[in-house]
Every structure is written in structure tokens, then in C-alpha cells.
Image: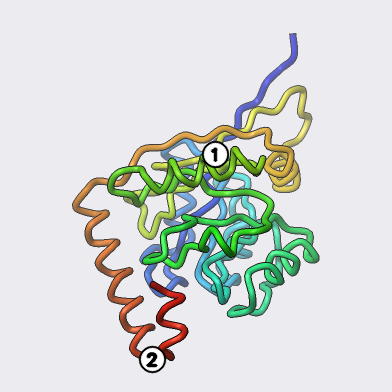
Amino acid sequence: MADETVVRFDPHVHSAASHDGTEPVARILQHARDIGLDAIAITDHDTIERSRSAAALAPKYGLIGVPGVEISTRDGHLIGLGIETMPEPNRPFFSTVQAIRDRGGVAVAPHPFQRIRHGVSKRSLTDCDAVEVYNSWLFTGYRNRRARTFAQRRSYPALAGSDAHSILTIGRAYTEIAFENAPEIDAEAILDAITDGAVSVHGRRAPFHRSVGHYIRGACRKTATITRTTPSRILELL
């Protein structure tokens, strides 16, 4: 009988390096270990330095660290997993996907179709390597179901991520990967499993009162963006 190793991976976590994050890297890694995660990616907004540090420190906590970043594109947010340098932000979505691939990474569309949270629109999501189909920051689950249907119809691998901005929600959604007869599992093996679609999603929504606060903060940031932009860009954001 084949030996199977199951890896629980949260691919979408923010540290204090994000404008809306609160936690230092060491605290995130310790908590991830304490709740039973096996791998984690720090994906801060438009900065990758803390993520690289977290990936290097992760083995000291018994974790596999995957470097990554959540990049702002012209068309919505995009996660790059497995990269050491960050593509230039605020470029078109499709060219940022290619920039991630050129760096040997995997391009993941986080919380798609949620425009209030800068998720990419269906019109712009023409190419990526995987879609986040379960994000814990949702009221009803409708957007998750829509993302899952979209991924299934287009044969995109499906991921789940907590999108945690504090330790209170780390691991509430995670991606599970089963490896058979694997002598060593590292970040590269995890990325290969994602692109192969050899993953399953697990999760539960964040508590309602925390979701309300999260959405209000997101709406305030979006309002601030709209007041600084042009009428044509406003229509794109809405």
C-alpha cells in the first residue's frame, strides 16, 4: 500500500507588512504550527520581503514556507506563489500572470468577482494557473460558489485560502494536498501539485461580525480610491 502524506496549506495570509495586516511573521508561523497547518504562504499586498523571510524561517517551525505576494493589477488582485521577486504592480492582469510564470511561479486569482475587494472581474479573468474558490471572508458563500463553478467549467485548479489579516482567521480556509510515496515535500512539490490540480479545498467562513468589519474597511479603501480617480476608472471599479 502506498504511503500517503497529507499537507494542509494556507496560501493566502497577510502579515503586518500589508496595509491591512497586523501580525509579525514569527507569530503567524507559530500559530500556523499550533493549529496544525503544514505549509503557509505570506501574501502581502504589493510587497514580498516579509514573505521571503517567512519562507526561510518556516522550517524552524516545522512548516513548509512558500514565498508569494498579492499584487495589485489594473484589473484586480492576483497572487503569485513561489516567486522571489515581485512583478511591477498596476499592470494589466494578463501581463502580470505571465510575469509570475516567467519567475517560475503560479498565478492564482484570489476572491474573484468581488469588486469591493478588488477581485478580478469575469471579463478580465481570461488566464491564470488556479482560482481561489473558497475565501473565508464571505457573508453568504455566493461568490465562493460562483468562483467554484467558474473554475470547474474552465478546468482551473481550485484553491482555498483564509485571506487572514490576523491570527484569528489563519487556517479557516486551506488547501489540502495528498502526496504518495513522497521522500521530501517542499515548496516546489506544492506548486507542482497545484498546477496539476491534485488539491482539495476545505474551510469555514469567518465570524459574521469580523466579516462585517472586514467589508467596511474594504469599502472605505475603495471609496478613497474612487475619489482619487477618473470617471471612466470609477465605472470599472463598480
Is residue 31 visible in this depiction of the protein? Answer: no
Q: Secondary structure at mark 1?
A: strand
Circle on res. 175: 1
Cα–Cα span, label 1 and label 2: 37 Å
- Picture layout, residue 104 above or below residue 143: below
Disc 2 on helix, strand or loop?
loop
Amino acid marked by disc 1:
Thr
Mark 1 or mark 2, which has the lower sequence index? 1
Residue that lies at the very extreme toward the left in this rendered image: 209
Could you say where residue 96 lies in the image, as x and y percent from the top left? 68, 70
Number of marks drawn = 2
Residue drawn at the location 58% of the way across and 80% of the way down:
90
Picture colour scheme: rainbow
Q: Is residue 72 visible?
A: yes
At horizontal 19% and vertical 52% (from top left) the residue drawn is 209
Question: What's the residue at 68%, 74% (across, down)?
Answer: 87
Residue 1 sits in which quadrant? top right
Q: Quadrant of the C terminus?
A: bottom left
Does 45 sit left or right of 164 as displayed?
Answer: right
